[in-house]
Amino acid sequence: MITGKKKTVVVGMSGGVDSSVTAALLKEQGYNVIGVTMKTYDFDEVGGNVANETSCCGLGAMYDARMVAAKLEIPHYVVDFREIFGREVIGNFVEEYLRGRTPNPCIICNREIKWGELLRKAEALGAEYVATGHYARLRFDESLNRYVISKAADELKDQSYALWAVSQQALKKTMFPLGDVAKSQVRALAMRYGLRNAQKDESYEICFVADNNYERFLKERVPELEKQVADGELVMEGEVVGRHRGYPFYTVGQRRGLGAFGRPVYVTEIDASTNRVMIGESDALLKRVLVARRCNMVGRAKLEAGQVVQAKVRYKDGATSARAYPEDEETFRLVFDEPKRAITPGQSVVLYDGSDVVAGGIIDGLLE
RNA sequence: UGGGGUGUAGCCAAGCGGUAAGGCAGCGGCCUUUGGAGCCGCCAUUCCCAGGUUCGAAUCCUGGCACCCCAG
């Protein structure tokens, strides 16, 4: 059945249901499918619970991917991305926390690893496309002359937010076969294909922090950290009201672990230079203006000043109306119509026009 | 040691003779391809201690103890 016309697709297989079904669907559609699983880190370097099975790059995951590939009768390779992943993803993760910000490593991983190194590997293998199990839609829009990512049909599972940083050149070679499929259908398909991971749990943590304890991870990664940052000041309305464990271990919007003040209090700001963590009541989290950097344009070539968009400020966030004001190629200011809660430096802001991803950037600061 | 006040969960606190509200913290679960948030559930057999009155006491009485304030 192999003909010269068949296109070759590399599917990034994590061992989970979504990427497994992705591979199965493409194979059924007649593509020449190659399964590739990325080895991104070693457990002994990264610590935590080695037995954790829900992580996207864990050990069990690699075995599952191999077994699924065998079942589907497609070739399967494991590629060693430890070096680049450690440098780009883990390195950025640690740096950002040390700056008092809250990174989203999935964003960097998508840009640098899946649509960076993996795509280069796919090209080297002679593949025309890379496909993943992301829930997002992708189309080429003739009138815009751009590749446009948009929200998945299954809006509850939509992952378009995490894909804003992928370049146009990379999207040109990308497929998201699950964009129109509901999660429940994916599981049903997995059953039908007889895939062993049909009932496997969702992953829900940072893959390289398998015990979901990033504080532990940072302390192990930066040996002197605990000593340097312990016992900083907790500040409310300008007054020192307590102590904290160290600024990197908090994030804006956080409520737990601050101590009892007779009412709920939240982290409102983190100052790495003084090791101070500012806290306040819920209202103190409401802000209207942010500055985003490292911007990438997706569904539009550029932003118009005052352009109306719907913006998401974190992964699970209802998009709310705002106006964008570009400052330069990589920077824009965003003014929300209504104050937005807990805008967090280091997280991504993604701009939508309806279902389409217009652009995204990393939140750098709040103005008011 | 004169006068006044207060002692209820880790913290704040309601209750004022009828069988221990609520909030914060904590813990458990749900949710979730990031961190947070959110939601649900749990959390005082007992009210500083000892007696007493009462069918019934955290609530009333007596006596201790502790802390606070005002005086000296």
Image (cartoon, rainbow, N blue to C red):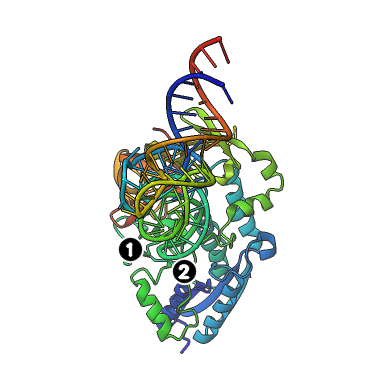
Position of residue A275 relative to residue A176, above or below, is: above
Numbered circles on residues, count: 2
> A292 or A298, which is in the foreground?
A292
Judged from the image, the secondary structure of the residue bearing numbered disc 2 is loop
Q: In this view, does A115 lie to the left or right of A183?
A: right
Residue A137 x/y as whole percent: 36, 65
Q: Which of marks 2 and 1 is nearer the N terminus?
A: 1
Chain letter for the residue marked with disc 1 in the picture:
A
| Residue A32 at least partly seen | yes
Q: How crowded is mark 1: few (under 14 residues within 10 Å), some or many (20 or more)?
A: some
Residue A59 x/y as whole percent: 61, 72
State if disc 1 and disc 2 touch (CB < 8 Å). Answer: no
Q: In this view, does A100 lie to the left or right of A137?
A: right
Q: Circle 1 is placed at which residue position?
A: A155
| Residue A294 at least partly seen | no
Position of residue A32 relative to residue B39, above or below, is: below
- Give the residue furthest to the right: A223
Q: Is residue A186 left or right of residue A74?
A: left
Q: Which amino acid does label 2 sit on?
A: Glu
Which residue corresponds to the image point at 29% horizontal and 57% vertical from the top-left? A143
Chain letter for the residue marked with disc 2 in the picture:
A
Q: Circle 2 is placed at which residue position?
A: A202
